[in-house]
Amino acid sequence: MNARHLVRVTVNGVQHQREVEDRLLLSDFLRHELGLTGTHVGCEHGVCGACTVLVDGLPVRACLMLAVEAEGCAIATVEGLAGANDSLNPLQQAFREAHALQCGFCTPGILMTLTAFLRECPSPDEAQIRHALSGHLCRCTGYQHIVDAVQRVASGGGATDKGQR
Amino acid sequence: MTTRQFGMPMPRNEDARLLSGRARFIDDIEPHGVLHAALLRSPYAHARILRIDAAPARARDGVAAVFTAADLGAFWQQAPMVVPPAPIPGLVFHQRTQVPLAKEVVRHVGEPVALVLASSRYLAEDAVADIVVEWEPLPVAAGLEQAVAPAAPRVHDDLDSNVSAWARQTKGDYPAAARAAAHIIRRRIAYDHGCAQPMETRGVLAQWDADAERLTVWDTTQAPIPLRNGLAGLLGLSERQVRVVAPFIGGGFGPKVMMFYPEELLVPWAAIRLRRPVKWIEDRAEHFFATTHERLQIHDAEMALSADGRILGIKDVFLHDNGAYDPYGLTVPIISQCTLLGPYRVPSYDSTFTAVFTNKPTVTPYRGAGRQHGVFVIERLLDIGAHQLGLDPAEIRRRNFLAPEDFPHNHGILYQDFAPLEYDSGNYAPMLQRALELIDYERFRREEQPALRAAGRCVGIAVVCYVEGTGIGPYEGAKVQVQSSGKVSVLTGIGTQGQGHATAFAQIVGDQLGVSAGEIEVITGDTDQFYWGAGTFASRGAVVAGNAVHQAAHAVRQKVLTVAAAHFECAEQDLLIENGRVAVAGVPGHSVSLGELAVLANPVRGAVAAGTEPGLEASSYFGPEIGATASGAHAMIVEVDPDTMMLKVRRYVVAHDCGPLINPLIVEGQIHGGVAQGIGNAFYEHLAFDDEGQLLNASFADYLLPTALEVPRMEITHTETPSPLNPLGLKGVGEAGAIPVGALFAQAIEDALELPRRGVELLEIPLSPCRVWELSRAASPTPPPTGPAR
């Protein structure tokens, strides 16, 4: 049996503490230990970006990080993006208006990357948006409506700070 | 609601849950006490299993059970066919379908050999590594042409060759056409399609309720109802004892309609046997082997052309890589055979295919489902013909289009649905013209391209056309229901994997019942909610289920009017339905809500009138005799870097005709995604197998899905030729975008590098920078200063 370690993290502002195996992936920790299943697992080898979360404000592929490495970190996941009463934040709302998702499986990871990206680059041009998206695979949309959504939210004043704590 | 919702670009009903992480995908469902499955899979493409020792795995802490084929008893059998072969005269077909666990022989890498169930997936995978198997590797039939050679190792040693199927379909008199032809264009053309790679892999979760004697299976299937029916039969249960739920599914694209995958049999069986919930979630590495592919066809094709570039006939003989098993019958090669004819008048056709067993994962339909292969063949032959005749590629297509008065056009051969290949409607010339105008074809050829070439730039333009058989039978059904709260529900049996059914169907119903689409609840993919149906495939969801939904909603509308007219003691024609209420025209204050009418239609005392049904509810079924034929023209301007052969798409234009659009946003999304997959197939994605049947690039690091940097912005224009085959006039659009992209890339890259004039033709897909560089090395170094139009 592999050694177990204490992990203490803050996820979307809520503190959690679990004893886990050292080999447990952060993606599996979030999904199966904490029940935060909005973070999806697409490839488990760090290419597709579906599992992207923010760790201390920066996008991280949760399948390439062990849960024990997150000790003491503040993590933001898709569940923390919406406002009170599940109201969509401006980025989420723009995704809906622009039809930027189809099956929606890759969407949570893309939202997390874009949340960090728009904070760094609030008024991106199309080339910058496409570059920011290039770490994500989407098999449904052809990316165009995602680009449109980002342009829509960028021209409308930028994403909110929700989920970036 | 008086504004028509059909045709409006409405935002989707399903999005809020997906955007906030609340949508439940299969791996998000975790019943108490669930066991996690992992499978031991063959590392060999062809081998005999001499011995399996699972004892070390069974002894590991946390392992509940390990099963091999020997443990399955009578449950071990070849899976039933998904689609039997079409009844073509002279057909040869050898049925060899997959089994739940390989017993004596494995026939492709990744074929499952043992099932481990443990308290976590981590432990289950540990235990898989504990299992000892003694293998005897056997000779491998990997390559398509190699496998069909007389001395090839046999994939199924009870057959005398690797021929899975042979079929010939003809119309007209091709030899006479060839004798009359001014030109015969004859080429060997190879088209290799890749794998679907939905972002969510497959998964199965099963729970047996021993007290209720009911099985619930959650499955990432595109066809929950056939899965329910088949599972019930195989497990010895009644269909009423089995509930299959297709929850939110992260993309399908065809391989998720395949059944029965071994895991779909094993997981429910194990859940019943162990009386514990069992869950298997495919990982991405498994997906490359455990989920079906599409792959190579090699066509020896010839086209007989008149002196003015009219097609007199086509002869084609092709090989189709079927993989190790053939549960899908002739579906993919017969679609290639039929779709090759395109939007053109082809007076004579002689097409023969041989589907070949190989020691590779099984081939089943993936978005396009063989259409790409056929379209590539005819489009390339037309391009070569145009070059030979000095015609513009657009002009040779124009000269061969079927005219509006040619419909319905029966090609005289059988299609995948066993019905005659008959195009219901179409209007191709204006569609091509739209594409050419949008990309400014004439001006680019006349002004921009010469100027850029003079500056040393390698820019090319291309235009290709295609048809897509969509919306085939057998049928779909739907139930529309007004609840006593007034809430309108739509229930249908098809599964949904991102197509926006919860919105498009709501728009159809909303117009009939005067309710905003955003307030209508659409439930798909739960066999307890709707009993009948076939599934989501062949671009048929909107066409077949959409029309069933429309009919059911219309029937409910009639019931609403009947009940309201009795209530107000007025004539039905005096009633208005809007904003969830029924009002008497011109009588203020005389209105009643749909919910109140639903209660009136379901009284607690008194009697329902004879011959009527309680409630405001109706079910309806729609089954078209033949499919509706959609069509499109794609055009592209590309620039190739002559040093690296990397390319940049400067413009990408789609003119598409799928009849009336239910929701333009959704239709455009479908086309965008299809084109993106087509671009992957044309230039980036390649399943690289070696001679031993090993897939050398089974990861996203090596199998290159296009990203936002490779997929260009697309400009889309629609023409609308309604189908006469269904009340809404709909044609499917799900696969459309993906179909012509290989043909478009080949023509555009040839034009950019001026390859035809330099004696090189691109007759294969996928291309890649390396492959274009290799092929173009054979080109004469400098194009002649003048030449034909291209």
Image (cartoon, rainbow, N blue to C red):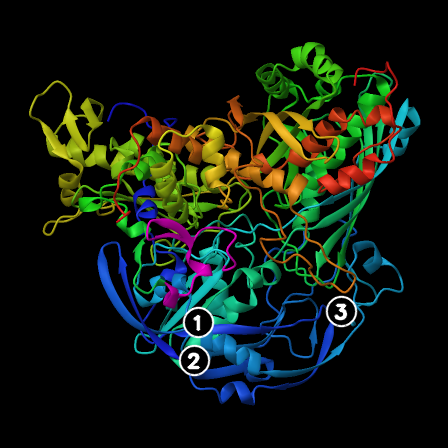
Label annotation for residue B156:
3
Residue B676 picture location, percent across and down: 56, 38
Q: Is residue B232 above or below residue B165?
A: below
Q: Are marks 3 and 2 on the same chain?
A: no
Q: Which residue is mark 2?
A: A2
Reading the chain from its start, which is encountered first: label 1 or label 2?
A: 2
Quarter of the picture holding the N terminus of chain B = top left
Q: Which residue is mark 1?
A: A23
- Label 2 Cα neighbours within 10 Å, binned few <14 / some 14-19 / many ≥20: few
> Magenta includes A65?
yes
Residue A47 picture location, percent across and down: 52, 52
Q: Between residues B626 and B305, which one lies in front from this camera angle?
A: B305
Which chain does tag 3 point to? B
**Residues in magenta, as a range:** A44-69
- Decide if residue B631 is in sight here: yes
- Please report the residue visible at 61 percent of the width from the left and 50 percent of the height from the top: B365
